[in-house]
Image (spheres, rainbow, N blue to C red):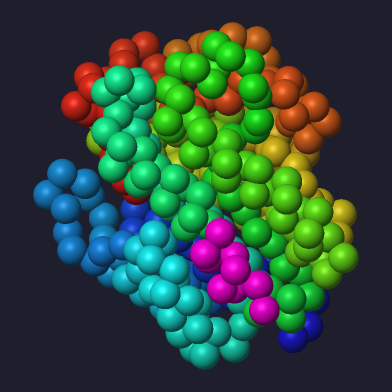
Amino acid sequence: MGHPDPRTLADRVVLVTGASRGIGREIAVRAAADGAMVVLLAKTNTPNPKIPGTLAETADAVRAAGGQALPVVCDVRDADSVAAAVAKAADAFGGIDIVINNAGALDLRSTPKLPPKNFRRLLEVNVEGPFAVVQAALPRLRESDNAHIVNVSPPLNVAPSWVGAHVGHTVGKYAESLLTLGWAAEFASIPIAVNSLWPATTVASTGMMVAMGEDVVRAQARHPRIMADAVHALVTRPAAACSGRFYTDEEVLREEGIDDLSGYRLAASDDDRRVGAKPTHAGRHQGARAPDLGLRVLKQGPTEEEASTHE
């Protein structure tokens, strides 16, 4: 298909995992605003009394925004379920242009307090899940004239102080980032762009609000829409010119000429959300920035019981 305006997602097929709420929902709705066909994957369509948002509600929001929606109940830990969901998407929309690996597990417990089954879940959701999605979607991505994969995963920083704070969680998310590096090289000749995107500061995702408390997060966070706008900007760039990078949402938007980010603010001020030195350019020096794994910029940490969630 021809796409006269390369900076739009009109007529593109965008697959988003973890799409029932939070960042995934915002990414899906932003794509829909362009007229995209959006494949929505989430592990359940059953309402959760503690967490607002369902797969059906996201599908309704996608349609209301002007897009087409295909909601599919799919646990990314189940490779067969993933393959069936991808096949259903390709049959419904004729292909897949973009994959957003947004589904993620969050568990910030220390090594003595992290049960083995919970550590396995971190690896299943954060590593095996993205691998299964990309493996299943790869034949369709090869057919696209501007294919993109975005992993919602942090820049790689192997400073012991960062890796050691939440070893189980960090190992899983870093492994997903290593997939970004490997796939960018493996798929370069096609080309399929593969990049990681991560919030520069705390974003009020559903998982964070469950783990940390809604009041705590909202007092020090940005709206998930900032990640959606950054994803849109990233996946409408030429695939051959933009791959193998670790971006923050701020970096992408500022490269687009958007310097005023105050419209995304839920916190009273930027200073409420930020600690440490100003981030350096992620794509030029992979170890230059310590990743915010969702806890470090918060002024109040979770209890051990509150530290586990799966979005």
Tell me: 19 left or right of 240.
left
Please tell me which residue lies in front, 282 or 203. Answer: 282
For residue 54, above or below residue 282: below
Q: Which residues are magenta?
A: 131-139
Q: Residue at the location (57% across, 45% down)?
A: 176
For residue 198, above or below residue 191: above
Please tell me which residue lies in front, 301 or 171. Answer: 171
For residue 146, above or below residue 299: below
Question: Is 125 contained in the magenta span?
Answer: no
Instruction: State the image coordinates of residue 191 (x, y, percent, origin top left).
Output: 82, 66
Q: Place residue 120 in its image quadrant.
A: top left
Q: Main secondary structure of the magenta part?
A: helix
Q: How many marks?
A: 0
Q: Is residue 305 visible?
A: yes
For residue 231, above or below residue 146: above
Please tell me which residue lies in front, 104 or 109. Answer: 109
Please tell me which residue lies in front, 174 or 251. Answer: 174
Q: Is residue 58 visible?
A: no
Q: Quadrant of the N terminus?
A: bottom right
Question: Is 135 contained in the magenta span?
Answer: yes
Q: Residue at the location (78% across, 35% down)?
A: 283
Instruction: State the image coordinates of residue 256 (x, y, percent, origin top left).
Output: 75, 43
Q: Residue at the location (36% across, 27% down)?
A: 108
Tell me: 261 left or right of 213.
right
Instruction: State the image coordinates of residue 151 (x, y, percent, origin top left).
Output: 59, 50
Instruction: State the image coordinates of residue 148 (x, y, percent, origin top left).
Output: 69, 62
Q: Residue at the location (62% across, 42% down)?
A: 177
Q: Place residue 216 in its image quadrant.
A: top left
Tell me: 92 left or right of 42.
right
